Amino acid sequence: MKFAVLSTDHTMVENVIVAREDQQSELQIALGRVLIDAGPLGLTVGDLFNGSAWTRNIEGEQVTLPIGDSAAVTEAIAILEGADDE
């Protein structure tokens, strides 16, 4: 499974890693970062969350990514909006 490693403020994809799904929690603790499923979102390094949508810089323009409804999208938005803050 591909995981997007989010920045500390959850607004940018800093890295994409491949790991088993059952390793997500362990990796989050080890890296000190939030990991979300990059597959359904199509996320890659450098993608930004602008508060309402994920965007990608394409030839100098921030283009909104085509994100559809899915459990991964719901989880990602909840994280970005601080639902998982402890």
Image (tube, grey):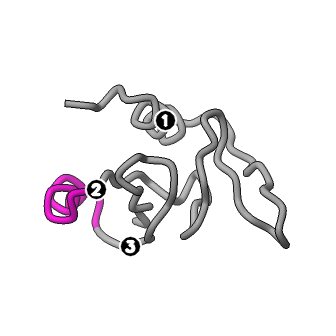
Quadrant assignment, res 45: bottom right
- Circle 2 residue: 33
- Check residue 8 in the rendering and tell me which mark sits there, or answer none: none
Question: Between marks 1 and 3, how big is the CA–CA gap?
Answer: 20 Å
Q: Considering only vertical position in the picture, is 53 above or below 26?
A: above
Q: Nearer the viewer, mark 2 or mark 1?
A: 2
- Circle 3 residue: 17
User: What element does badge 3 sit on?
Assistant: strand
Q: Quick check: is 61 in the magenta stretch?
A: no
Q: Quick check: is 31 in the magenta stretch?
A: yes
Q: What amino acid does circle 1 point to?
A: Ala
First along the sequence among labels 1 and 3: 3
Q: Position of residue 17 (x, y in %)?
A: 38, 73
In the image, is 19 to the left or to the right of 11? left
Q: What span is colored magenta in the figure?
A: 20-32
Dominant secondary structure of the residues highlighted in magenta in the image: helix
Q: Position of residue 49 (x, y in %)?
A: 59, 46
User: What element does badge 1 sit on?
Assistant: helix
Q: Position of residue 39 (x, y in %)?
A: 53, 59
Q: What amino acid does circle 2 point to?
A: Arg
Question: Between marks 2 and 1, how big is the CA–CA gap?
Answer: 20 Å
In the image, is 7 to the left or to the right of 13? left
Quadrant assignment, res 42: bottom right
- Circle 1 residue: 71
Do the CB atoms of the residues marked 1 and 3 lie less than 8 Å apart? no
Point 35% across, 55% down: residue: 35
Q: Position of residue 7 (x, y in %)?
A: 40, 57
